[in-house]
């Protein structure tokens, strides 16, 4: 029975009936926490100190947060390597040479080497050739049933593209590579067009569907597609390009990349694997943290009267940790990382260029507030909480502020993450298909009691 405007089945009475069943599920599905210790289970595939359980090998990227000194492993300044190349070297070269480096970085991840000028030009042309959607796809798919959630819209578009691919299930290396390059090329279109449809249907905004510009970089095209007049400053495009480079890949163990490898190991198609990764990235524990940072800072700006008063800032942060401010979770968003403790190299890189953008936008006072919270928050956390390792600002701390200054709508924050990370997912899918060769199937220890079947009349 369909009884509401969306056509979704359900009534209040039906929902109450389902709700009554949820309590049964809850009562019969809880695992005694002490059993995880008894059986030495690595919850979340992590050791008690937060170290990830070794589940595979990769030659795509390396996240370094510890070093060995006199036989002891100790925390160190974080470093991130793509195919062995330090990401700081990539970004510093791009900024010093006044050029965009996302496409070069994608080439490095996919092919394992830095391209020369000829190879890079060839690859950029290839991306431009692929940067088009099937005829009427925007009208028939994106516009026909716009979603309130851009990640779901993006996932639906990816799965629908399967139907347009005559070799959708072909897992030959060249075919999978073709599919990956195609998805990397069109993710900006799928994301921005999905948002434009949402803004038009749900908020009554004017509808703009711009075509991509062949000569533009990925960051330039995102800004062109999004803005009514298609204009942007060089610094705006440079900031977004750096953000894409920093989000493109982060080791095989992060949730969405591991999802890509798990699903790919089953032998499924590229579109299904990438859609599964999108579902993972959508989760607020993974891809949505930068939006929470910007919302937290809006709260700070309202409630801290003097942004220069570090005591007042400290008091606010203590109240956050005590669940007395902001969203009541007790979390200072943008602080801490599963791997990094001393520093997140992506934060260091992004912070420097965000400072320039803040100056261009006349928002240096806000940047100064971010910088103060970045410095003060770890001290407050160490005072208030027992933690097994140090805490520092992660990349989400400044990326949301950067996107806000670029006038990116909040609904696109996580899709922009996906626009970058699809290249990393693609590299890991290719590596899984080439090198792994076994379906990923970790073990779960059964702790359920054995019992006899009871005939229905005796229950």
Image: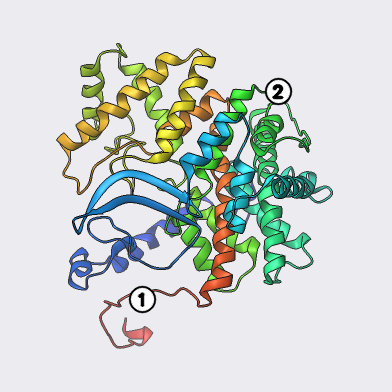
Q: Is residue 59 left or right of residue 74?
A: right
The vertical placement of 451 against 381, above or below, is below
Q: Residue at x 55, y 56 (%)?
A: 425
Please say if the residues under marks 1 and 2 sit with CB atoms less than 8 Å apart.
no
On-image quarter of the C terminus: bottom left
Q: Quadrant of residue 368?
A: top left
Q: Residue at x 51, y 44 (%)?
A: 247
From the image, tell me which residue sits under label 1. Answer: 443
Precedes in sequence: disc 1 or disc 2: 2
Q: Residue at x 53, y 30 (%)?
A: 403
Q: Position of residue 239 (x, y in %)?
A: 55, 30
From the image, tell me which residue sits under label 2. Answer: 231
Label 1: which secondary element:
loop
Q: Is residue 250 left or right of residue 274?
A: left
Q: Viewer-proximal residue, 101 or 160?
A: 101
Q: Residues within 10 Å of mark 1 (few under 14, many from 20)?
A: few
């Amino acid at each position: 029975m369909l009884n509401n405007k969306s056509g979704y089945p359900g009534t209040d009475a039906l929902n109450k009936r389902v709700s009554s069943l949820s309590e049964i599920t809850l009562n019969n599905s809880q695992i005694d926490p002490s059993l995880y210790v008894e059986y030495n289970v690595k919850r979340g595939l992590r050791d008690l100190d937060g170290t990830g359980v070794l589940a595979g090998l990769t030659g795509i990227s390396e996240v370094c947060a510890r070093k060995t000194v006199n036989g002891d492993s100790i925390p160190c300044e974080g470093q991130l390597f793509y195919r062995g190349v330090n990401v700081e070297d990539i970004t510093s070269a791009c900024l010093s040479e006044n050029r965009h480096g996302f496409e070069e970085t994608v080439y490095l991840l996919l092919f394992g080497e830095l391209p020369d000028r000829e190879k890079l030009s060839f690859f950029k042309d290839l991306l431009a050739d692929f940067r088009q959607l099937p005829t009427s796809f925007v009208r028939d798919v994106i516009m026909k049933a716009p979603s309130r959630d851009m990640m779901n819209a993006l996932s639906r578009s990816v799965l629908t593209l399967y139907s347009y691919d005559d070799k959708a299930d072909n897992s030959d290396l060249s075919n999978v590579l073709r599919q990956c390059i195609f998805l990397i090329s069109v993710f900006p279109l799928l994301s921005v067009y999905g948002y434009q449809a949402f803004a038009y249907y749900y908020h009554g905004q004017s509808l703009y569907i711009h075509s991509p510009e062949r000569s533009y970089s990925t960051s330039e095209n995102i800004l062109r597609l999004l803005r009514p007049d298609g204009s942007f400053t060089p610094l705006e495009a440079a900031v977004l390009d750096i953000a894409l480079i920093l989000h493109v890949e982060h080791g095989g163990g992060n949730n969405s990349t591991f999802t890509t490898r798990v699903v790919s190991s089953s032998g499924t198609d590229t579109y299904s694997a990438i859609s599964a990764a999108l579902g993972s990235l959508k989760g607020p524990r993974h891809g949505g943290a930068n939006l929470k940072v910007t919302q937290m800072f809006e709260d700070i700006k309202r409630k801290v009267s003097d942004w220069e008063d570090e005591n007042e800032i400290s008091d606010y942060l203590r109240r956050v940790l005590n669940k007395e401010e902001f969203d009541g979770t007790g979390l200072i968003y943008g602080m801490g990382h599963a791997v990094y403790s001393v520093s997140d190299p992506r934060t260091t890189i992004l912070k420097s260029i965000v400072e320039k953008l803040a100056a261009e936008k006349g928002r240096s006072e806000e940047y100064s507030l971010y910088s103060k919270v970045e410095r003060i928050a770890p001290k407050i956390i160490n005072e208030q909480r027992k933690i097994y390792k140090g805490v520092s600002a992660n990349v989400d701390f400044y990326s949301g502020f950067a996107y806000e200054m670029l006038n990116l709508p909040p609904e696109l924050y996580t899709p922009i993450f996906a626009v970058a990370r699809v290249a990393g997912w693609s590299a890991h899918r290719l590596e899984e298909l080439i090198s792994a060769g076994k379906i990923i199937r970790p073990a779960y220890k059964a702790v359920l009691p054995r019992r006899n079947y009871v005939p229905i009349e005796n229950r």
